[in-house]
Image: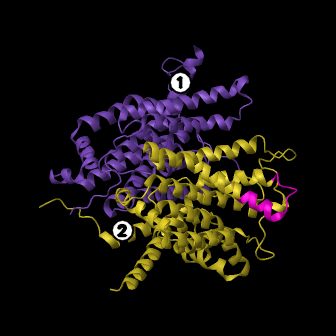
């Protein structure tokens, strides 16, 4: 069987199995699973507004997906994109509220640069602990996610709380710091293009440059990479910092393009969904872009299904997790078969 | 003195869910599987324990439901990482995302959103020495320290099953040649571990709080992963690590009320235990010896 035929079968298998796994939950809500899936996947694509909203929903996932994919390619298990995104959002909201007098391009640049820098700073400590003391980055990046959320809440309940309404929201950022909208009348903002450009740039660097080759070598085998004369520690720290910066940029994009302020519910777990995006995209940048759009479609579809059919919008989260697990399972079965479970004769 | 005793009591209470989670994760990892599904398993244990108790009116039913969910979550991790042999990080994160999604989804279906919090009558504390002292604790706390921890240690260190469990986590090829069923042992470890994690989550809803909120676990599953490393995959050291985290947690709760600490945002104090755990890892976690087959699926050549 040709490789493409095999892949097509695999994709069909993933779709069917995911559907079957999620059907019980849809039946539980008393809806027709086919009607629900039609909402999840196709309804957002049938209107101009829906399509634009799919783009909007995919923006943070373009950033977190690229961030996670880059780190995973280097064999650096950055599970902390969520915290890095939140730190980027904090920096963006803080800078954005203080750049009133500046011209728009400069103000926006400062906001985005601040977001990227904050994300990188949040990613720095786990990276240094990993290369200096060999401390598992999975644990440290994970633990810093709740800490980042606490920093957000501390700011919103404390110094940044709205003095008039007492809402836990930071002051609105300056108009000059807002992301320009790409298509008038929609919410699709410049962050969409920035995300795509970053993905294209990363794709080029990874596949065409020496730095990309070193990154992949470290990811495949740190020991072999060291023998080849690659500075493994430097490569890992660089991958971690760039990954954090991209995630931070994603947070800045949500602040400057959607919310215009820091809010407690700014991230719907975008950092964790980034892991889904990166994995389903096979850690390749083209795949990341495609999957981010697909999950954007699912997000818009799930909230549309929530309004039209009355099923909780968390159905989208269940479907996303199911797709992830079914895919990694099918890919592994396709590659290795099921492990031999019989005892020796 | 009263301050210290109060602190000790609160420490034991706060450590309880972490003891369940840490011992559960210790079992999974000693068998060679990193279970990042722990956060979601604790979350689902908290929710389904609560839901079953609220619907049936029986806390025992709640506890049993949590155990069932935990066994199922462990079996799912087993299917993914043992039978199929997928990447353990991705399988665990996916399991966590799925279980949190399912819990929130069912929560919305069964208990609606917004309009008032559903409550159950939580387990009352068991107070053999009268109220308000160190031994004014929930039953699940006594079970954790006086039953589970010694039993979990004994099983792991002294029984045939414990030896097999450690063997498949250290050197599955050797265990296999010695006639140990690697897959079955790993499934058992994951399912026992999952049940313990879920009970740890259910402690919040069935004992400490009596209600379910969306941020109920708030990263405590991730904390357990760190505690396991800090405890170097040993049951008693893991329990000690849980007590350390819980002590810092209880301390910050008490500091918050003091006037001198009013100026510090309480969120900062709340972040303290997480940062202490990271610091503890830095001090003690260098060059730790991971289980030999950690993260490696076993495939017979």
Q: Nearer the viewer, mark 2 or mark 1?
A: 2
Q: Residue A203: x percent and y percent?
A: 54, 72
Q: Is residue A345 left or right of residue A312?
A: left
Q: Identify the disc placed on residue B9.
A: 1
* Residue B34 part of the magenta segment: no
Name the mark on residue A332. Answer: 2
At which x and y percent is residue A12?
Answer: 44, 80
Residue found 73% across the figure and 77% down from its top: A49
Asked if marks 2 and 1 fall on the same chain, the answer is no
Query: What's the mark number on residue B65?
Result: none
Q: Is residue B49 visible?
A: no
Q: Helix, strand, or loop for circle 2?
A: helix
Looking at the picture, tell me which residue is in the foreground, B68 or B145. Answer: B145
Asked which quadrant contains residue A192, the reply is bottom right
Which quadrant holds residue A288?
Answer: bottom right
On screen, A87 above or below A3? above
Neighbour tally class for label 2: few under 14, some 14-19, many 20 plus, Cα within 10 Å: some
Residue A101 covered by magenta stretch: yes
> Going by the image, does B243 lie left or right of A317?
left
Horizontal and vertical percent position of residue A160: 78, 45
| A9, A107: nearer the viewer | A107
Indicate the secondary structure of the residue bearing disc 1.
helix
Is B159 on the left-hand or right-hand side of A330?
A: left
Distance of label 2 from label 1 (alpha carbons): 48 Å
Quadrant of the snapshot with the C terminus of chain A: bottom left
What chain is the yellow one?
A: A
* Rendered shade, chain B: purple
Label 1 is found on which chain of the structure? B
Taking the spot 55% from the left edge, 52% from the top edge, the residue there is A80
* Screen quadrant of the N terminus of chain A: bottom left
> Is there CB contact under 8 Å for labels 2 and 1?
no
Magenta range is A97-112
């Amino acid at each position: 069987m040709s490789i493409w035929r095999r892949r097509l079968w695999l994709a069909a298998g993933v779709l069917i199995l995911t559907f079957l796994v999620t059907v019980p939950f849809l039946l539980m809500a008393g809806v027709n699973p086919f009607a629900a899936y039609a909402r999840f996947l196709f309804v957002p694509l049938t209107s101009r507004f829906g399509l634009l909203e799919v783009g909007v929903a995919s923006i943070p996932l373009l950033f977190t997906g690229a961030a996670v994919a880059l780190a995973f390619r280097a064999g650096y298990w950055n599970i902390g994109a969520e915290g890095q995104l939140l730190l980027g959002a904090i920096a963006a909201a803080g800078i954005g509220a203080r750049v009133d007098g500046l011209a728009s391009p400069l103000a926006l640049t400062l906001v985005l640069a601040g977001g990227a820098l904050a994300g990188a700073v949040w990613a720095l400590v786990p990276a240094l602990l990993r290369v200096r003391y060999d401390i598992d980055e999975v644990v440290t990046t994970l633990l810093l996610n709740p800490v980042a959320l606490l920093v957000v809440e501390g700011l919103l309940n404390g110094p940044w709380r709205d003095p008039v309404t007492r809402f836990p929201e930071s002051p609105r950022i300056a108009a000059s710091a807002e992301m320009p909208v790409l298509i008038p009348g929609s919410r699709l903002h410049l962050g969409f293009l920035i995300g795509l450009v970053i993905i294209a740039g990363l794709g080029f660097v990874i596949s065409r440059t020496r730095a990309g080759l070193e990154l992949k070598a470290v990811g495949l085998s740190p020991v072999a990479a060291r023998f080849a004369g690659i500075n493994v520690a430097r490569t890992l720290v660089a991958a971690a910092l760039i990954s954090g910066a991209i995630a931070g940029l994603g947070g800045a994009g949500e602040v400057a393009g959607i919310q215009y302020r820091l809010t407690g519910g700014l991230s719907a777990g975008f950092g964790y969904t980034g892991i889904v995006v990166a994995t389903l995209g096979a850690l390749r940048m083209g795949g990341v872009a495609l999957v981010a759009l697909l999950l954007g479609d699912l997000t818009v579809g799930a909230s549309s299904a929530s309004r039209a059919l009355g099923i909780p919008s968390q159905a989208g989260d269940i479907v996303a997790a199911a797709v992830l697990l079914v895919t990694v399972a099918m890919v592994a079965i396709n590659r290795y078969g099921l492990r031999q479970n019989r005892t020796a004769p | 003195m009263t301050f210290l005793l109060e602190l000790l009591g609160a420490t034991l209470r706060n450590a309880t869910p972490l003891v369940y989670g840490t011992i559960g994760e210790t079992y999974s990892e000693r068998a060679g599987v990193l279970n990042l599904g722990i956060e979601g398993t604790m979350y689902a244990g908290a929710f389904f324990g609560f839901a079953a108790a609220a619907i049936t009116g029986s806390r025992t039913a709640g506890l049993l439901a949590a155990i069932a969910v935990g066994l199922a979550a462990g079996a799912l991790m087993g299917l993914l990482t043992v039978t199929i042999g997928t990447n353990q990080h991705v399988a665990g994160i996916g399991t966590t995302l799925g279980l949190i999604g399912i819990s929130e989804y069912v929560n919305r279906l069964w208990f609606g959103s917004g309009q008032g919090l559903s409550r159950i009558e939580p387990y009352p504390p068991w107070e053999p020495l009268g109220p308000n002292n160190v031994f004014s604790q929930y039953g699940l706390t006594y079970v954790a320290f006086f039953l589970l921890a010694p039993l979990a240690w004994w099983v792991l260190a002294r029984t045939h099953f414990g030896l097999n469990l450690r063997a498949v986590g250290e050197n599955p090829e050797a265990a296999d040649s010695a006639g140990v069923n690697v897959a079955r042992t790993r499934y058992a470890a994951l399912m026992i571990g999952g049940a313990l994690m879920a009970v740890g989550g259910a402690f919040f809803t069935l004992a400490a709080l009596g209600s379910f909120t969306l941020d109920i676990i708030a990263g405590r599953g991730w904390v357990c992963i760190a505690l396991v490393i800090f405890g170097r995959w040993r049951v008693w050291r893991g329990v000690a690590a849980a007590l350390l985290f819980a002590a810092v947690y209880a301390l910050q709760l008490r500091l918050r009320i003091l006037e001198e600490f009013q100026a510090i945002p309480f969120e900062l104090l709340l972040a303290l235990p997480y940062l202490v755990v990271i610091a503890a890892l830095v001090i003690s976690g260098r060059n730790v010896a991971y289980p030999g087959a950690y993260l490696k699926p076993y495939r017979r050549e």
